């Protein structure tokens, strides 16, 4: 009951699962959430092998009541909450002109509102322990990506929310962290939504050449411990932020050409 507790949404795969494994190895109790209960339980069993307590909670973060239940079950199980990592997210790949509005709403519900709901219900417990709220954003939250209008919009919104939350809590002891991983090896591109909301099914990128989720988890843990405000990962990500500041028009052209080369680019 006295061990620190981390809650990770989207904790059954990718960056979320890697974070769960990292924090477990560092002595935290771990609560993970996800929509796929079978995969969630399987991941929890793997994490338990590290000799820590794990709580899997099947939730859809786009639903307010599910997010409330995630906090309630975590407190019931562990009695405290010290770190919340808002990691759950979905992507898309389609031209805006052809995309159904329901697809954009689904992205905002998961990527933005999911983080807002989870943070809202966790906040009293995090404030009590002067804990951490972290949000997994993206380079798409720094520069708009063509073919991913809903994804970029949700990440821009997430970053604005976290920045405002950080400033509101300058004197409360709450730590707010924004994480921009860049292109990372994960399942998010395989599960990206098409223009009509169907699953894309395959990644347009060579996943094996991307940054490993475990490396991202190591950096996130370090940033939580050192209470950093933001981390931008990968050379490509850091270069994007720099170019956006000094050469925004040139960056637009670079991004367009780069993503246009992807197989089956929708623009």
Image (cartoon, grey):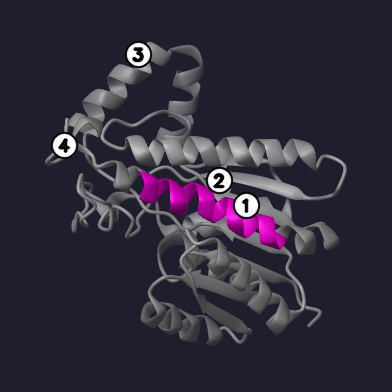
Callout 4–callout 1 Cβ contact below 8 Å: no
- Point out the frontmost of discs 4 and 2: 4
Is there any visible trace of residue 40 in the rendered image? Answer: yes
- Point out the frontmost of discs 4 and 3: 4
From mark 2 to mark 1, how far is it between C-alphas?
A: 7 Å
Q: Is residue 170 left or right of residue 59?
A: right
Q: Earlier in the sequence, mark 4 or mark 1?
A: 1
> Main structural element of the magenta stretch: helix, strand or loop?
helix
Identity of the residue drawn at 25% across and 33% down = 96
Callout 2–callout 3 Cβ contact below 8 Å: no
Is there any visible trace of residue 27 in the rendered image? Answer: no
Q: Which residue is mark 1?
A: 134
Q: Earlier in the sequence, mark 2 or mark 1?
A: 1
Looking at the rendered structure, the secondary structure element under dot 4 is: loop
Looking at the rendered structure, the secondary structure element under dot 2 is: strand
Callout 4–callout 3 Cβ contact below 8 Å: no
Foreground of the two, 124 or 135: 124
The location of residue 124, given as percent across then percent down, is 78, 60
Q: Which residue is mark 4?
A: 265
Query: Where does the magenta region start and end?
Result: 105-122
The location of residue 208, given as percent across then percent down, is 27, 56
Q: Which residue is mark 2?
A: 179
The answer to which image quadrant residue 97 occupies is: top left
Q: Which residue is mark 3?
A: 250
From mark 4 to mark 3, how far is it between C-alphas?
A: 20 Å
Identity of the residue drawn at 63% across and 84% down = 52
Foreground of the two, 164 or 261: 164
Looking at the rendered structure, the secondary structure element under dot 1 is: strand
Which of the numbered marks, if any, corresponds to residue 60? none
Looking at this view, name the residue that lies furthest to the right: 171
Identity of the residue drawn at 43% across and 12% down = 247
């Amino acid at each position: 009951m006295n061990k620190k507790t981390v809650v990770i949404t989207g904790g059954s795969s990718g960056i979320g699962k890697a974070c769960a494994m990292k924090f477990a190895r560092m002595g935290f109790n771990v609560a993970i959430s996800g929509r796929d209960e079978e995969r969630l339980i399987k991941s929890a069993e793997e994490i338990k092998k590290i000799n820590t307590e794990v709580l899997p909670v099947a939730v859809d973060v786009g639903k307010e009541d599910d997010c409330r239940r995630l906090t309630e079950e975590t407190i019931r199980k562990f009695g405290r909450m010290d770190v919340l990592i808002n990691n759950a997210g979905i992507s898309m790949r389609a031209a805006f002109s052809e995309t159904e509005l329901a697809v954009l709403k689904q992205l905002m519900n998961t990527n933005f509102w999911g983080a807002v709901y989870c943070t809202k219900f966790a906040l009293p417990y995090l404030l009590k322990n002067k804990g951490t709220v972290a949000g997994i954003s993206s380079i798409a939250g720094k520069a708009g990506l063509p073919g991913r209008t809903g994804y970029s919009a949700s990440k821009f919104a997430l970053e604005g929310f976290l920045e405002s939350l950080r400033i509101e809590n300058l004197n409360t002891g709450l730590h707010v962290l924004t994480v921009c991983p860049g292109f990372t090896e994960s399942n998010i591109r395989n599960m990206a939504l098409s223009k009509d909301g169907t699953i894309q099914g395959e990644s347009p990128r060579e996943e094996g050449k991307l940054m490993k989720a475990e490396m991202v988890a190591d950096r996130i843990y370090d940033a939580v411990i050192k209470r950093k405000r933001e981390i931008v990962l990968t050379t490509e990500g850091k270069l994007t932020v720099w170019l956006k500041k000094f050469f925004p028009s040139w960056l637009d052209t670079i991004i367009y050409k780069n993503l246009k080369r992807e197989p089956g680019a929708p623009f």
